[in-house]
Amino acid sequence: EVQLVESGGGLVKPGGSLRLSCAASGFTFSPYSMNWVRQAPGKGLEWVSSMSSGSSYIYHADSVKGRFTISRDNAKNSLYLQMNSLRAEDTAVYYCARSIAADTHPYEFDYWGQGTLVTVSS
Amino acid sequence: QSVLTQAPSVSGTPGQRVTISCSGSSSNIGSNYVHWYQQLPGTAPKLLIYRNNQRPSGVPDRFSGSKSGTSASLAISGLRSEDEADYYCASWDDSLSVVFGGGTKLTVL
């Protein structure tokens, strides 16, 4: 059974940093593209970052570019999101999602984790 | 403001057929696949339709997707109470980003 389990969320002050992790199991992690999607309280889905299996592509949304960095460790079956210079508007549930990938970008997100809540507040 | 446009809400009665529309542009829907996600209350999103009109294993054939030009639609026939959820369309945009619609809340009356 495919499982994606996010961790690392919590309360952080504006300007602070947080590192989210996503532990994958139940499938061979390395061939898949991986992604982060967030959802602010009561709002819709917002794509954050995508990374291909061999790091041939890495994309970040404009709203997080220069502040967030996606990375992965295929040996540990894990995906990460380093979040720096956090702002109140980054408050959201952050989901990790697996995707099939074309050569240059992800296709559908076929499995999602349950999410981890990040709250940015003083 | 989302790049893909969806109506905020739609409703129907049990057994009815409803459609949810998603409007984009030539840089996203017009030149890339559309995918649909269902988010039941309090849960993570789930893939419902991928690559315009494909259903993942386990998704009932009451759900169907289509695409024409820069728009896409999700149809749900034989509406059931358990279909009450938020539905999101998504696509790749040639500006190098994944774009989502704002979501449509389906209410089963």
Image (spheres, coloured by chain):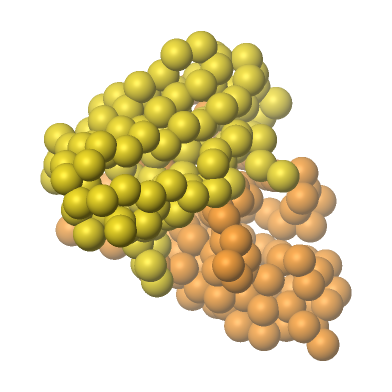
**Rendering coords of residue A80 (x, y %):** 55, 61
Choose top left, top right, bottom left or bottom right for residue B23. top right
Please give the name of the residue rendered at 38% of the width and 50% of the height, measured from the top-left corner. Answer: B11
Seen in the picture, residue A110 relative to B91 is either above or below; the reply is: below
Seen in the picture, residue A27 relative to B95 is either above or below; the reply is: below
Can the viewer see residue A108?
Answer: no
User: What shade has chain A been given?
Assistant: orange
User: What shade has chain B been given?
Assistant: yellow
Q: Is residue A1 left or right of residue B47?
A: left
- Give the camera-side residue of A104 and A71: A104
Q: Is residue A10 left or right of residue A90?
A: left
Q: The C terminus of chain B lies in which quarter of the figure?
A: bottom left
**Rendering coords of residue B51 (x, y %):** 36, 25
Please give the name of the residue rendered at 31% of the width and 48% of the height, measured from the top-left corner. Answer: B12
Q: The N terminus of chain B lies in which quarter of the figure?
A: top right
- Give the camera-side residue of A64 and B103: B103
Please give the name of the residue rendered at 42% of the width and 37% of the height, measured from the top-left corner. Answer: B20
**Rendering coords of residue A2 (x, y %):** 24, 56
Q: Is residue A105 left or right of residue B94?
A: left
Choose top left, top right, bottom left or bottom right for residue B42. bottom left
- Give the camera-side residue of A13 and A76: A13
**Rendering coords of residue A62 (x, y %):** 77, 44
Please give the name of the residue rendered at 20% of the width and 51% of the height, measured from the top-left corner. Answer: B14
Q: Is residue B42 left or right of residue A70?
A: left
The mark tally for this picture is 0
Can the viewer see residue A3?
Answer: yes
